[in-house]
Image (spheres, helix red, strand yellow):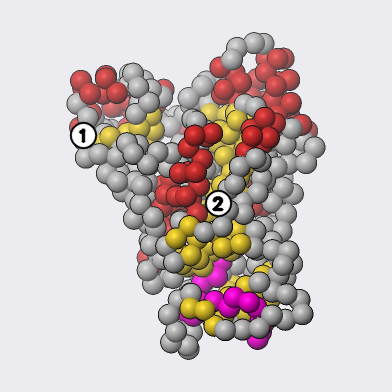
Amino acid sequence: MKRRKFLQLTIPAVAALGLPACTRIVGSVEPQSLSIVLRGGKVFYKRQWQTIDVGIDSNGRLRLGTNLRASDTINVNGKTISPGFVDVLADNSMDPDITYDTFEKYKVTDGVTTALQMHGGSAECGPYYQRFAKRSHLINYGVSTFVMVIRGQGGSVAIRKKLVEQNLAEGALGVSHSLEYQPTPYEEVLEYAKLAKKYERPFFLHLRYSSNEKELDGVDEAVQLAKDSGAHVHIDHLHSTGGTFHMESALDRIRAANEQGMTITTCVYPYSYWATYLYNRRFDPGWQQRYGISYGDLRLVGSSERLTPESFARYRKSSKLVATPEGIMPLEKTVDVALKESFCMIASDGGIQFESHANSHPRGAACFATALRHAIEINLPMELIIEKMTSLPASVVRPAMKDRGVIEDGAIADLTVFDPATVRGNATVENPNQFSSGIELVIVSGKVAYRDGKLRDKAGVEIKASS
């Protein structure tokens, strides 16, 4: 796969002015009627870090230059101006009509301007978009075709294919399936991937295996799927499913496939432990041997409770999410290795759904701020980690994400301003519902969605594929 040309992104630095962040400066409106100018921040523009004015016009488009004037000029001295973060593995599929407000709140406060549910999504994308278009949104939103739900409704493979294609025709951003959670014959999976290729949409795949002995078989299957279908295959969270024990070998396979003309991307989240629902097949008999853990290692998310054989059996009958011990996926052997590859991006595989009785992985609220902090700690170039949170994920769902995920003149004004000195995720297993630190300002479609710790305008729009 040829590496795409990624346009301007952003990084931290300290500028000369001594004003506090987000201070208003009195200005006047220029003929082009800029509504906002961000001044004093560092921008990765034209392949280098620069301090330039980033303006937003009345159409919500970026205007770049010097000495721009607007009705609202915001001092962001010493901060980084980045394209808004794009989460292609956001998860709010259980009851989105009820939980979307909470879900979006914890995304925007982590700097996310676009949350795309490409791991699951919806089995009825047309009605989904119709319902959500009637509501106000803090961030941009979009969904993929949820094959697991379609298959769960029964019917023949021919009927399932028809439903998948109907979703694609109605604007679904891709096709998504989870083979570990719902084992499916390869021949049937191939039919879904061929439909993704027919519509030039990506096929998002949770691999079939996560054990030490078989995880690479799942990677090989994904490569074969890309070869046989011609589809762009995206492997979900490689460090927790496919590369936990053999990351370098998994990456070698993906890299070789791309060099042979296939298109395979993948993603990771910056946490050394995974979490999932107890009813999932990952906790079928033999899980202790597969992952080298036991009941007492499992933590009920949203509490300090450690499981026992009795509580495991009780919670497995309900929709409870548990987290494994920290270090079960060592960052230095998994995430850090994967991030060196041009085809690997950051994605959360999470979302906060409930304010009370919180039971969501902390990555749903803190993935992107945590990724920035981790990149700083391991000396990963800031422009590289930002690329992996903006233009790279946006490229997977183009043209639906056209003019988003980049900072260039005329691009859509989805922006995140953060302080590299203080940015970090605060969500924990015990208390996942916490805002990230250091996210100073988030702009969605030219409007301020989050500023100085407060939620503001709701200007998010649907991200939908054209038929």
Residue 441 shows up from this direction: yes
Q: Amino acid at mark 2?
A: Leu
* Count of numbered marks: 2
Q: Is residue 158 left or right of residue 45?
A: right
156 in magenta = no
Which residue is drawn at the image coordinates 35% and 22% (left, top)? 318
Residue 319: x %, y % from top left:
37, 26
Residue 286's spot in the image, x, y percent? 32, 21
What is the distance, in whole Å, between disc 1 and disc 2 at their CAs?
35 Å
Query: Is disc 2 surrounded by few (<14), some (14 to 19) or many (20+) residues within 10 Å?
Result: many
Please say if 196 is above or below 444: above
Please report the bounds of the magenta region as a residue range.
Answer: 65-83
Disc 1 residue type? Answer: Arg
- Secondary structure found at label 2: loop
Q: Residue at x 80, y 37 (%)?
A: 467
Residue at screen point 56% across, 66% down: 82
Residue at image mark 2: 138
**In the visual, does 116 lie left or right of 20?**
right
Residue 82 magenta-highlighted: yes
Seen from the viewer's position, the closer of residues 420 and 288 is 420
- Residue holding disc 1: 306
Q: Position of residue 464 (x, y in %)?
A: 70, 42
Q: Compare residues 170 and 71 and report the one nearer the observer.
A: 71
